Image: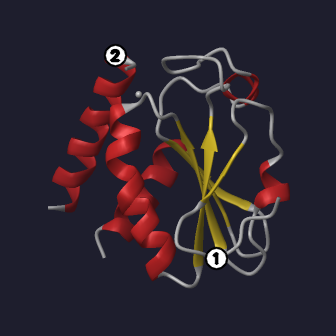
Amino acid sequence: MKTLSVLAFSLLCVAGVAFGSASKPVKGKHPARIAQGSEVALADHAVPGKITIFDFTSDFCPPCRMIAPMLDALHEKRDDLAVVAIDINRPDVKGIDWKSPVARQYELRSIPHFKIFDAKGKMIAEGDAAREMVMGWLGE
């Protein structure tokens, strides 16, 4: 079942890429949303004492919109995790903003894209490995 979920999520990500049409974070109802296309130093936004999931996203990405409520629920449910959404879109760009400073900074080729930092602020996973970790947490 977990493999099927990962496969389905991966297919949604590919579809989203193909069609392309969609301060310190604190614990709260919704994850912090930062960047709005600007470059960002992720370590500055890692939540001390918590595993921080950085979710690179865009409102114009269908798979991003689909997974967002699940990430919101994970953020709310797990006291040891925090989710920070990195909005890759600049405010004036319609469609997925692959040319934004933050998308270029992290050489993004697909979204949603995850980077995970441990409770001490050290990156422990990114890309496929991070996606697998997130999918595992979502499946709990």
Quadrant in which residue 83 is drawn: bottom right
Q: Position of residue 81 (x, y in %)?
A: 57, 75
Name the foreground residue: 32 vs 2: 32
Q: Look at the image and tell me in which quarter the C terminus lies.
A: bottom left
CA gap, disc 2 and disc 1? 34 Å
Which badge, 2 or 1, is on the more N-terminal residue? 2
Q: Residue furthest front?
A: 92
Residue 74: percent from left, percent from top: 43, 71
Disc 2 to disc 1: CB gap under 8 Å: no
Name the residue: 65% across, 18% down: 92
Does residue 19 lie above or below 58 as drawn?
Answer: above
Residue at 58% across, 82% down: 80
Side of 6 relative to 104 (left or right): left
Q: Is residue 53 or residue 70 the one in the foreground?
A: 70
Q: Classify mark 2: helix, strand or loop.
A: helix
Quick check: 14 above or below 125?
Answer: above
Q: Is residue 9 left or right of residue 38?
A: left
Residue toward you, 85 or 137: 85
Q: Which residue is mark 2?
A: 18
For residue 46, which numbered disc appears in the image?
A: none
Q: Residue at x 41, y 28 (%)?
A: 22
Q: Quadrant of the N terminus?
A: bottom left
- Residue 42 lies left or right of residue 109; in this view the side is right
Residue 54 in the image, given as x and y percentages of width and height = 61, 53
Q: Residues within 10 Å of mark 1 (few under 14, many from 20)?
A: some
How crowded pointer 2 is (Cα within 10 Å; few <14, some 14-19, many 20+) is rated as few
Give me the disc on residue 27: 1
